[in-house]
Amino acid sequence: MDFSSMFDLISLVCGGYVLITWFKLRAAGRLFPNNLLIPRDKSPKDCLDQAGYILYISPRLLTLGIIVGLSGLAGLVNAWFQLYGFWVAEGMIAVCLAALVWYCVCNARAVKKYW
């Protein structure tokens, strides 16, 4: 397994984890200890407005999970079937990393507002 395939596999697993966190958040309807949701030095009970935070972060979490998961899946499929070339693969990695940075910025804003 080459580095690109390893990155794709990690992306697929991470995207799945983010989507599981999203499903769990939607099902519970409340915050729970999770590094994607709760700042390191805080707990769920420290949140000033849990409903508002969940409403804000939920669609962003779903978007991140879909982008990262699909990027990993597409990369693994491409490793087996060679459907697209190097530059498309690099572009998909860039989109994946951009989504991660976007989520981090959104999460930082939410921490300032809701904690």
Image (cartoon, rainbow, N blue to C red):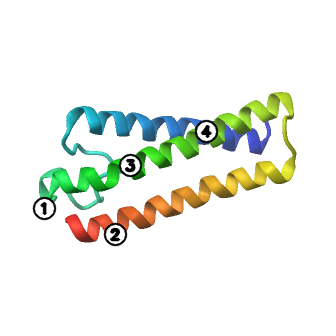
Q: Earlier in the sequence, mark 2 or mark 1?
A: 1
Q: Amino acid at mark 2?
A: Arg
Residue under label 4: 70
Tell me how far mark 4 sits from mark 1, CA to CA: 34 Å
* Quadrant where the C terminus is found in the figure: bottom left
Q: Nearer the viewer, residue 18 or 2?
A: 18
Q: Amino acid at mark 3?
A: Pro
Q: Earlier in the sequence, mark 2 or mark 4?
A: 4
Residue 16: x, y in percent? 49, 34
Tell me how far mark 2 sits from mark 1, CA to CA: 14 Å
Tell me how far mark 3 sits from mark 1, CA to CA: 19 Å
Residue under label 3: 59
Circle 1 packing at 10 Å, graded few (<14), some (14-19), many (20+), is: few
Residue under label 2: 109
Nearer the observer, disc 3 or disc 4?
3
Q: Earlier in the sequence, mark 3 or mark 4?
A: 3
Q: Earlier in the sequence, mark 4 or mark 1?
A: 1
Circle 3 packing at 10 Å, graded few (<14), some (14-19), many (20+), is: few
